[in-house]
């Protein structure tokens, strides 16, 4: 129902000079979608208040309500062209009045978990990139035809929005920065087997793919109003450093059904490990932290094992954030398994956690990223005794038209609980590791076997063949002289 509208919005954005990439299209459509969502939410809350016979005070005041500046309507429901700003007047209103008003919500909100705080946080960072008020007018009118009124409508919008995030991730230099393949996420969640009442955290939340998929997994388990309240307010937590990713994550979780996501716009690594208290710790961590980044010296001082590699700092953070007995599934570059700079971190992980499973992902898992990755599955508490490895080897080369599917993970999920040995899976005893704790993926079932020595007849046959070739070569040389 809404698919064509999304396409029309993207077409309008492509004609806007201020928007030049998939990242821009997603960013600009996101803040507009967010304001339309707020308008629908306000209407829903007002109707509920009227049914209870209570007064309702709108969160967004006039003249900043969607129906007053974005799509003012006549009594018959049609757009009131006389009141609808356009051209330079619209751009001026958005830049000089609307955004400053919404930005101020951050300072007026009661606390960070409110939707009011989310409004202020988003509009403190994001900028309007529309140069043409006529292009913006087109996008506003198209967006107004979308509706967040029912779960079915939200579900359809969430699917369309996920597709937009996927395109954005694949268009970037590092596809994994914004988009982790959903089949991989679902496999990680399946092995974690979360339950209602457990807290789930992603400190490098990106587009919130892990949290959205975890909510999708847990939602059918909710049988009571209390269960639903727990899922909405006391289950999913995330932190994101980049402003674009923060608004995308917020919008993505809203579309998936979490009305006021518990997301913070902050640098996770700026928090010293020593400051993390037991009350901060969580039951489950699901994450794909950025790798290849470099952190400044003052950030490195927050960690006992100092390194400039972003992913290694995140891994230390995740280990500290887990409760005793807590579970984690972390995507990381495969060089972590053998890199000399990570030796101390590997030792710490093996000693403080049970690293029970390593999933070796194939080349092309992250489209456009050009790196090999693994997934570390571990539980905090007892040290590691034995690690079960599984090599994911699809029967095709991965690409845009042949990405990973849920079916590719079926064997892994079937074998993992049994820790079975197959041509693709094996175990490694920690006691057999050397001082470097090298965990490189070395499938013992694929080691080159020593060639069987030739028998006497085969040796004679080879010698005769070589003699014949030599004779023929000498004859040709003589003919040329």
Image (cartoon, rainbow, N blue to C red):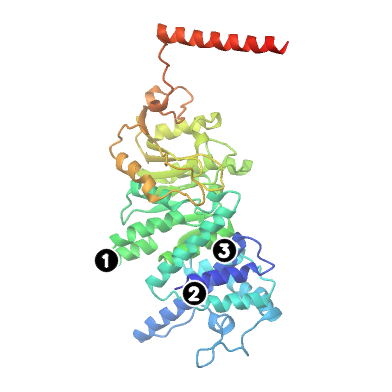
The quarter of the picture where the C terminus appears is top right
Where, quadrant-wise, is the N terminus in this rendering?
Answer: bottom left
Q: In which quarter of the image is residue 169?
A: bottom right
User: Quick check: can you spot residue 270?
Assistant: yes
Front: mark 1 or 3: 3
Relative depth, front residue between 454 and 150: 454
Kindly identify which residue carries mark 3: 26
* Contact, mark 2 vs mark 3 (Cβ under 8 Å): no
Dot 3 crowding, Cα within 10 Å, few <14, some 14–19, many 20+: many
The span from disc 1 to disc 2 (Cα, nearest Å) is 26 Å
Q: Name the residue under label 1.
A: 224
Residue depicted at 58% across the width and 54% down the height: 171
Eyeballing the image, is 333 above or below 451? below
SS category of the residue bearing label 2: helix
User: Which of the marked residues, 1 or 2, is nearer the chain's N terminus?
Assistant: 2
Dot 2 corresponds to which residue? Answer: 38
């Amino acid at each position: 129902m809404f698919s064509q509208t999304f396409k029309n919005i993207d077409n309008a954005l492509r004609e806007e000079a201020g928007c030049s990439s998939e990242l821009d299209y997603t960013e600009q459509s996101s803040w507009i979608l967010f304001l339309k969502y707020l308008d629908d939410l306000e209407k829903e809350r007002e109707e509920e208040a009227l049914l209870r016979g209570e007064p309702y005070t709108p969160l967004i005041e006039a003249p900043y309500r969607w129906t007053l500046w974005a799509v003012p309507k006549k009594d018959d429901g049609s757009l009131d062209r006389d009141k609808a700003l356009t051209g330079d007047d619209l751009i001026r209103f958005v830049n000089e009045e609307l955004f400053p008003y919404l930005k101020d919500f951050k300072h007026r909100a009661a606390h960070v978990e409110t939707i009011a705080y989310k409004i202020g946080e988003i509009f403190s960072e994001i900028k309007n990139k529309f140069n043409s008020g006529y292009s913006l007018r087109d996008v506003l009118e198209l967006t107004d035809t979308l509706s967040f009124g029912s779960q079915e409508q939200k579900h359809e919008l969430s699917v369309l929005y996920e597709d937009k995030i996927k395109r954005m991730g694949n268009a970037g230099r590092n596809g994994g920065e914004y988009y982790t393949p959903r089949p991989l996420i679902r496999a990680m969640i399946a092995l974690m087997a979360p339950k209602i009442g457990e807290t789930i955290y992603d400190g490098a939340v990106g587009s919130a793919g892990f949290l959205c998929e975890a909510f999708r997994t847990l939602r059918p388990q909710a049988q009571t109003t209390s269960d639903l309240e727990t899922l909405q307010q006391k289950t999913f937590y995330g932190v994101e450093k980049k402003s674009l990713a923060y608004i995308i994550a917020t919008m993505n979780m809203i579309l998936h059904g979490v009305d006021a996501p518990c997301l913070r716009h902050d640098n996770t690594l700026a928090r010293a490990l020593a400051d993390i208290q037991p009350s901060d710790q969580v039951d489950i961590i699901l994450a794909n932290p950025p790798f290849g980044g470099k952190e400044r010296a003052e950030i490195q001082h927050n960690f006992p094992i100092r390194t400039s590699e972003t992913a290694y700092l995140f891994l230390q953070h995740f280990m500290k954030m887990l409760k005793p007995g807590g579970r984690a599934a972390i995507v990381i570059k495969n060089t972590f398994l053998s890199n000399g700079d990570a030796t101390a971190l590997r030792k710490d992980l093996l000693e403080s956690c049970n690293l029970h499973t390593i999933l070796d992902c194939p080349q092309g898992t992250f489209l456009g990223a050009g790196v090999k990755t693994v997934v570390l599955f571990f539980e905090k508490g007892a040290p590691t005794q034995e690690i079960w490895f599984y090599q994911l080897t699809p029967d095709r080369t991965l690409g845009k038209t042949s990405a990973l599917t849920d079916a590719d993970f079926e064997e892994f999920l079937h074998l993992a609980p049994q820790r079975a040995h197959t041509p693709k899976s094996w175990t490694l005893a920690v006691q057999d590791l050397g001082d470097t704790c090298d965990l490189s993926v070395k499938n013992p079932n694929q080691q080159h076997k020593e060639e069987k020595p030739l028998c006497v007849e085969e040796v004679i046959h080879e010698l005769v063949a070589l003699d014949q070739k030599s004779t023929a070569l000498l004859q040709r040389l003589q003919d040329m002289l």
